[in-house]
Amino acid sequence: QSALTQPPSVSGSPGQSVTISCTGTSSDIGTYNRVSWYQQSPGTAPKLIIYEVTHRPSGVPDRFSGSKSGNTASLTISGLQAEDEADYYCSSYSSSGSYLFATGTKVTVL
Amino acid sequence: QVQLQQSGPGLVKPSQTLSLTCAISGDSVSSNSVTWNWIRQSPSGGLEWLGRTYYRSKWYNEYALSVKSRITINPDTSKNQFSLHLNSVTPGDTAVYYCARNNNWSFDSWGQGILVTVSS
């Protein structure tokens, strides 16, 4: 199965909002509310920041939010901070029983 | 707090078998509510789910189609860990390999990752 699709990069100034899209198909994002988002800094393992489309794990700042419409999920970072500069990946469960990941988006804080 | 500690060689020769282990603390490999997974990240950065093992009255293993013919994931209840074996490796299998717990359809705990290079 094909990976999910994200833009390679997004950028914003401190305090601004940025949104990362994650496009799949009716076999994954379009059918299941099993979308998650991960933040990864260089040399570290990915960290879960959103699960089941909209839920934040304990300890994740509320400036991170998730949503979904049709076959596309989105991650919004409101009030961008310097520490948010990292790579972000979305993932979805698929009808094949496997998990798909996207190619990742590099967020740059200007 | 769940912690996953990975171990295994960082260099494997082509055509041989890649073997890694993930030791679990703070949870049980026999848990009825989570699954235990292997994920790899290529040098270009993309993440790829490889497979999982889990217990629901009996053991189940499920694998990604891309590696299904070459992969085995085994639980070890005596040591509370699980392992990855990927045979007939090629340089295309060079990646950072992670173990991860899946809970609520997401990967909420990750190992530290091991870079495995396939080279003669």
Image: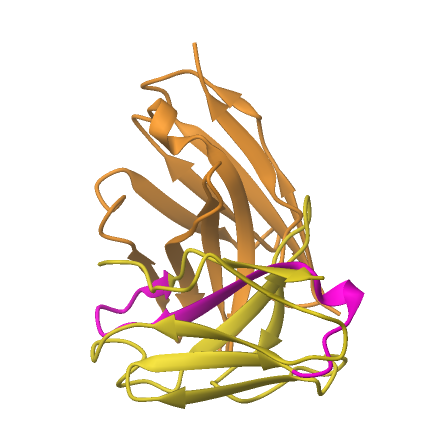
* Image colour assigned to chain B: orange
x then y, percent, for residue A99: 36, 65
**Quarter-wise, where is residue B21 in the image?**
top right
Q: State left or right for residue A63 relative to residue A3.
A: right
Residue at position x 46%, y 46% from top?
B40
**Quarter-wise, where is residue B114 in the image?**
top right
Check the picture and name the quadrant holding the N terminus of chain A.
bottom left
Residue at position x 58%, y 32% from top?
B8
Residue at position x 33%, y 24% from top?
B90
x then y, percent, for residue B68: 24, 47
Q: Is residue B104 visible?
A: no
The image's colour scheme reads by chain
Residue at position x 67%, y 83% from top?
A78
Instruction: From the rendered image, report the letter of the chain displayed in yellow.
Output: A
Q: Is residue B11 visible?
A: yes
x then y, percent, for residue A81: 77, 71
x then y, percent, for residue B43: 49, 36
User: Which residue range is magenta in the image?
Assistant: A78-100
The reply to whether the magenta stretch includes residue A95 is: yes
Q: State left or right for residue B103 relative to residue A102.
A: right
B89 versus B54 height, above or below: above
